[in-house]
């Protein structure tokens, strides 16, 4: 059986350290990559949920604005009844807001 010299033992230990270090780096890289992919999936899910919630709020706002915009302004001359001028302007404002927000699709 050949005798292991100090030089040969050092070379074997160095090779062992390099192999284990490389394995550790590889495992760490895989773990970091897996965690990054998981975070990306979670963020995508959260964004989709937020988008759906925003669409529900938008639908509710447009429904309410549509209701307000459908209320007809009183007919008649604003000069004869000054409150009509306010109500007619308010009616135009609701209709303009409804249309301006893109609720008509």
Image (cartoon, rainbow, N blue to C red):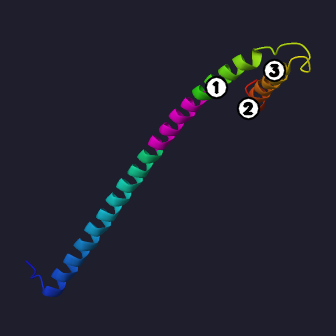
User: Eyeballing the image, is 74 above or below 82?
Assistant: above
Q: Which residue is mark 1?
A: 61
Q: Residue at x 48, y 43 (%)?
A: 43
SS at mark 3?
helix
Circle 3 Cα neighbour tier, 10 Å, few/some/many (<14 / 14–19 / ≥20): few
x, y percentage for residue 93? 79, 28
**For the C terminus, which image quadrant?**
top right
Residue 83 got which mark?
Answer: 3
Circle 2 Cα neighbour tier, 10 Å, few/some/many (<14 / 14–19 / ≥20): few
Q: Whole-Å distance between the Cαs marked 2 and 1?
A: 10 Å
Q: How many numbered discs, if any?
A: 3
Quarter of the image where one finds residue 68: top right
Q: Earlier in the sequence, mark 3 or mark 2?
A: 3
Q: Earlier in the sequence, mark 3 or mark 1?
A: 1
Q: Residue at x 43, y 47 (%)?
A: 39
Q: Residue at x 33, y 60 (%)?
A: 28
Circle 1 Cα neighbour tier, 10 Å, few/some/many (<14 / 14–19 / ≥20): some
Closest to the camera, between mark 3 and mark 2, is: 3
**Of the pair 8 and 76, the residue shown nearer to us:** 76
x, y percentage for residue 24? 29, 63
User: Eyeballing the image, is 40 above or below 92?
Assistant: below
* Side of 94 relative to 24 (left or right): right
Q: Which residue is mark 2?
A: 101
Mark 2 and mark 1 in contact? Answer it, CB < 8 Å.
yes
SS at mark 1?
helix
Closest to the camera, between mark 3 and mark 1, is: 3
Q: Earlier in the sequence, mark 2 or mark 1?
A: 1
């Amino acid at each position: 059986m050949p005798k292991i010299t100090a030089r040969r033992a050092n070379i074997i230990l160095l090779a062992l350290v390099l192999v284990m270090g490389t394995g550790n780096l590889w495992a760490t890289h895989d773990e970091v990559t897996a965690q990054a992919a998981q975070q990306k999936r979670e963020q995508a899910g959260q964004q989709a949920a937020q988008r759906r919630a925003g669409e529900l709020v938008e639908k509710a706002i447009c429904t309410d604005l549509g209701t307000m915009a459908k209320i007809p302004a009183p007919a008649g001359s604003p000069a004869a009844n000054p409150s009509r001028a306010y109500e007619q302007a308010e009616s135009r404002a609701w209709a303009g807001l409804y249309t301006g927000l893109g609720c008509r699709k």
